[in-house]
């Protein structure tokens, strides 16, 4: 389902990205609609797949994760079978909070959380090295999160020149 985003749709998406806990009444007020049409628009955006879900943003440090590592993984084999086994195994490992199949020297980029460097070392030796098809990996550690909120820019409509 393709949706042509108008100004109100873009405002709804931006408001929900900032605070998904807004009530329909609060959301409607922000975009100058009454609640019923606002709710219908949000439903259309959900059904079109533009809104994929709603989540709480948790504090890694408050949950005891003092280390965030970015792990570049090089595969020893590039068959579909090995890639599928690798990707399926990643889904089972909660410490891996994001994974991207990337271009360049490495094949995958993982974002991993751990309590501390010792815990990450154990995780790397016992878990990462045991993943299917892994030839080598390289770890970098976050020293400071500069921009953590993952908010997508809402595109303006195309305007021909």
Image (cartoon, rainbow, N blue to C red):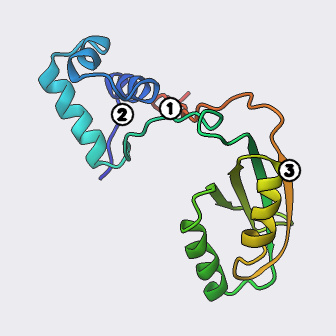
User: Helix, strand or loop at disc 2?
Assistant: loop
Q: Which residue is mark 3?
A: 140
Q: Is residue 5 above or below residue 122?
A: above
Please determine whether, in this image, residue 107 is positioned above or below residue 53.
below
Residue positioned 44% across, 36% down in the render: 56
The numbered dot on residue 155 is: 1
157 lies above or below 105: above
**Quarter of the image holding residue 96?**
bottom right
* 116 vs 94, nearest the viewer: 116
Q: Are marks 3 and 2 in contact (CB under 8 Å)?
A: no
1 or 2: tag closer to the N-terminus: 2
* Cα separation between marks 3 and 2: 39 Å
**Residue 105: x %, y % from top left:** 86, 66
- The residue at which mark 2 appears reads as 5
Marked residue nearer the N-terminal end (3 or 2): 2
Q: Nearer the viewer, residue 37 or 86?
A: 86
* Residue at disc 3, secondary structure: strand
Quarter assignment of residue 10? top left
Mark 2 burial class by Cα count in 10 Å: few <14, some 14-19, many 20+: some
- Residue 84, horizontal then vertical, whole percent: 59, 80
């Amino acid at each position: 389902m393709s949706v042509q985003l108008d100004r109100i749709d873009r405002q709804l998406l931006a408001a929900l990205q900032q605070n998904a806990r807004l009530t329909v009444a609060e959301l409607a007020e922000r975009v100058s609609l009454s609640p019923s049409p606002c709710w219908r628009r949000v439903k259309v955006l959900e059904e079109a797949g533009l809104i994929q879900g709603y989540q709480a943003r948790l504090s890694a440090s408050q949950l005891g994760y003092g280390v965030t590592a970015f792990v570049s993984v090089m595969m020893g084999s590039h068959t579909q079978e090995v890639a599928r086994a690798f990707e399926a195994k990643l889904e089972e490992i909660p410490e891996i909070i994001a994974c991207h199949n990337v271009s360049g020297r490495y094949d995958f980029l993982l974002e991993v959380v751990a309590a501390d460097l010792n815990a990450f070392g154990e995780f790397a030796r016992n878990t990462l090295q045991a993943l299917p098809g892994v030839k080598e990996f390289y770890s970098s550690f976050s020293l400071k999160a500069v921009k953590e909120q993952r908010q997508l820019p809402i595109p303006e409509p195309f305007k021909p020149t």
